[in-house]
Amino acid sequence: MLPSLFLSHGSPMLALTRTPAHDFLRELGRRLRPTAAVVVSAHWESRELQVSTSEQPETIHDFGGFPRELFERHYPAPGDPVLAGRLAHELGAAPVERGLDHGAWVPLSLMFPEADVPVVSLSLPRGRANAELAALGERLGSLRDDDVLVIGSGSLTHDLRSMAPLEAPTPAWVDEFTDWVHERLIAGDREALLDWQHAPQALANHPTPEHFLPLLVAMGAGGRAERLHHSVEYGALAMDAYAFA
């Protein structure tokens, strides 16, 4: 059975830049062979739960100010309308046609560069309580029995106002929050994680919550947490990845 994953996707430049996180995702993909992937990305929020039924999702370049090469990147992974229909039925999600935002295609393009794993995007429902998002993950957990990879794609820290050059030192307030999250995950302290906004330096690292919330979905979909990767880019973007087996 595959684990569920939380992946920090960082800057869209992750697709082009050889960093420890870039190399980690390439290696991770070599160890996994899912039948499909269901991705909950921080970059697709909706009022109600939605699921993409696209047969061939377009590559969405939902960013600006980056090199032309990044906008020329396309990730032609197929969708899986049958799986999407199953999720629509089981979760009460509204079926829509939608492509892959960079929270989905950037890490997937590194993990599965042949674009041979079908991808279904599931929205991050806005305004849900933390416990409701973990419960959504629990409902997705049964997909793991069919070797479907459940991925929450966000960023363990995400204060864009504090970004510095790529290899800048990590501020103490970033380490304090990432250490707290790691300790709580390894301890299996679900209650603390569902109240993560009160963690040390939580609001400094997440002025808005959407990049942390996919972790709660991934946590709900799996079991015991294991940290697969830790690094920090641009001073303020922790690129941690966790598996929930």
Image (cartoon, rainbow, N blue to C red):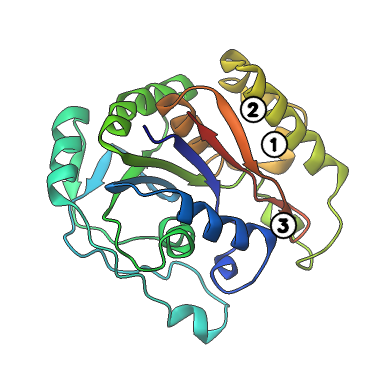
Q: Which mark is residue 161?
A: 3
N-term-proximal mark, 3 vs 2: 3
N-term-proximal mark, 3 vs 1: 3
Crowding at label 3, few (<14), some or many (≥20) Cα neighbours within 10 Å?
Answer: few
Seen in the picture, residue 163 relative to 210 is either above or below; the reply is: below
State the residue at coordinates (68%, 65%). Answer: 19
Q: What whole-number distance in Å separates the C-alpha atoms at marks 2 and 1?
A: 7 Å
- Residue 227 % position (x, y): 63, 36
Quadrant assignment, res 242? top right
Mark 2 secondary-structure assignment: helix
Question: Of residues 167 and 204, which is closer to you in this image?
Answer: 167
Tell me the amino acid under the disc marked 1: Leu
Crowding at label 2, few (<14), some or many (≥20) Cα neighbours within 10 Å?
Answer: some
The answer to whether the residue labelled 3 contacts the one labelled 2, judged by CB atoms less than 8 Å apart, is: no
Location of mark 2 (residue): 197
- Residue 23 % position (x, y): 61, 62
State the residue at coordinates (70%, 33%). Answer: 202
Question: Of residues 91 and 49, which is closer to you in this image?
Answer: 91
Q: What whole-number distance in Å separates the C-alpha atoms at marks 3 and 2?
A: 19 Å
Compared across the picture, whether 95 is left or right of 184 comes to left
Seen in the picture, residue 66 relative to 63 is either above or below; the reply is: below
- Residue 205 % position (x, y): 71, 42
Quadrant assignment, res 147? top left
Q: Which mark is residue 203?
A: 1
Mark 3 secondary-structure assignment: helix
N-term-proximal mark, 2 vs 1: 2
